[in-house]
Image: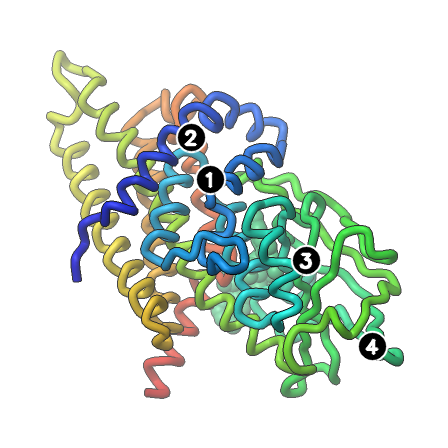
Amino acid sequence: MNFEYSEAQKQIASMIADFGAKNIRPKMMDWDEEQIFPVDVFKQLGELGLMGVLVPEEYGGSGLGYFEYVTIVSEIAKVCSSIGLSVAAHNSLCTGHILYFGNEEQKKKYLPKLATAEWIGAWGLTEANTGSDAGNMRCIATRDGDDWILNGTKNWITHGKSGDVAVVLARTGEPRTKSNVTAFIVEKGTPGFSAGKKENKLGMRASETTELVFDNCRISDAQRMGEVGDGFRQAMKVLDGGRISIAALSLGIAKGAYDASLKYAKDRHQFDQPISNFQAIAFKLADMSKKIDVAEMLIYQAADMKNRGVKMTKESAMAKYYASEICVEISTDAVQIHGGYGYTKDFPVEKFYRDSKLCTIGEGTSEIQKLVISRDILTQ
Ligand SMILES: Cc1cc2nc3c(=O)[nH]c(=O)nc-3n(C[C@H](O)[C@H](O)[C@H](O)COP(=O)(O)OP(=O)(O)OC[C@H]3O[C@@H](n4cnc5c(N)ncnc54)[C@H](O)[C@@H]3O)c2cc1C
């Protein structure tokens, strides 16, 4: 396997670096402070082909593979992890679900709008009382003739307010029974569908996270994706790919924190010498660099399997678990290397430190990744 960036990946990285310097970096601390989700930036990212990365060209997407996708999410996260999270959620959750499980009519209707960011997508699995235990959801869909009536809430939903369309997983069978969840596409403006509370978060503050509320929300059966009862299986498949996204997001944060630390360690002088001369600092940098390389290899292993259409549940969980844990460690060490300056908003590591923690939680906590990996190993 070749670990060099391909020409396409190099071009993507350079385009994102340029775009980030002009359109993201100058404003990102204001967005972070005010919890502003910069919709205009996503429209621009759509014009650059970064909002429908994996969507085939026939549906208006860029038709790229998972290597390029990892490059895109990680290079954006190197600049601003909040934007990275939103790009990842839009591409792999809402858009990904419709791409893999929508029928032809649904794909033709929604994918071109999502791939160009004319519409922003949301994906609702989690509820207030069911996060890791997602199968035990309370949001229900009841059949009424040719329609379905949705009632309940979804929590922690990325783009819950600004999203133009949401893929929603709702219970259509008895609690704790098999095949009791179905996936639906719900458009903004549908009567009975609204956004609830917006979360005030530790990090990832420019990525909007809100509640979705369904109050006798009537949707046609044409909005159902796949078979009745197939929703949970679909969601787990979507999350297999989604875990590569969060791993890539983690990688970008780790790289951003490391790059800033390497520069700072060479520039900052104490005791009449750069602090990089102190073994305590140099060894931190060595460990950071090693962890980044290992994470990258795990991520590309999972991406390669995904590109080849091979089952990669264990590998994507391993990549997500490792990359997210090391991104927290690296951003913590990055603050330490920066000393007091690292604790201020004048240096980027403070934001990486806050943003990094989401990666060990979103799309399955580290504990759940260990569960997924161990189950896979034990059933082989
Ligand atoms: C910023 C942000 C964005 C998000 N975006 C979305 C989104 O777009 N769509 C969506 O559907 N969800 C989204 N989520 C929800 C996210 O996926 C959940 O928060 C996550 O799955 C964890 O669920 P929970 O918060 O309910 O924690 P819980 O499941 O309550 O877990 C609490 C603790 O218990 C541990 N635990 C739980 N079960 C077990 C077990 N069996 N064994 C060992 N330990 C266990 C967990 O690991 C964790 O440490 C988002 C969350 C955040 C913070």
At 67% from the left edge and 48% from the top edge, which residue is drawn? 163
Mark toward the viewer: 1 or 3? 1
User: Disc 4 or 3, which lies upstream in sequence?
Assistant: 4
- Vertical relation: 379 (above or below) 249: below
Look at mark 3 in the image and give the residue it sits on: 166
Look at mark 1 in the image and give the residue it sits on: 48
Which of the pair 217/369 is nearer the observer? 217
Amino acid carrying mark 3 in the image: Ala
CB of mark 3 near ligand 1 (< 8 Å): no
At 42% from the left edge and 30% from the top edge, which residue is drawn? 19
Measured in 3D between alpha carbons, the distance from the residue under mark 4 to the one under mark 3, in whole angstroms, is 18 Å
Mark toward the viewer: 3 or 2? 2
Secondary-structure class at tag 1: loop
Q: Are marks 2 and 1 in contact (CB under 8 Å)?
A: yes
User: Disc 1 or 4, which lies upstream in sequence?
Assistant: 1
User: Disc 3 or 2, which lies upstream in sequence?
Assistant: 2
Determine crowd level at label 3: few under 14, some 14-19, many 20+ residues with C-alpha closer than 10 A.
many
Look at mark 2 in the image and give the residue it sits on: 19
User: Disc 2 or 4, which lies upstream in sequence?
Assistant: 2
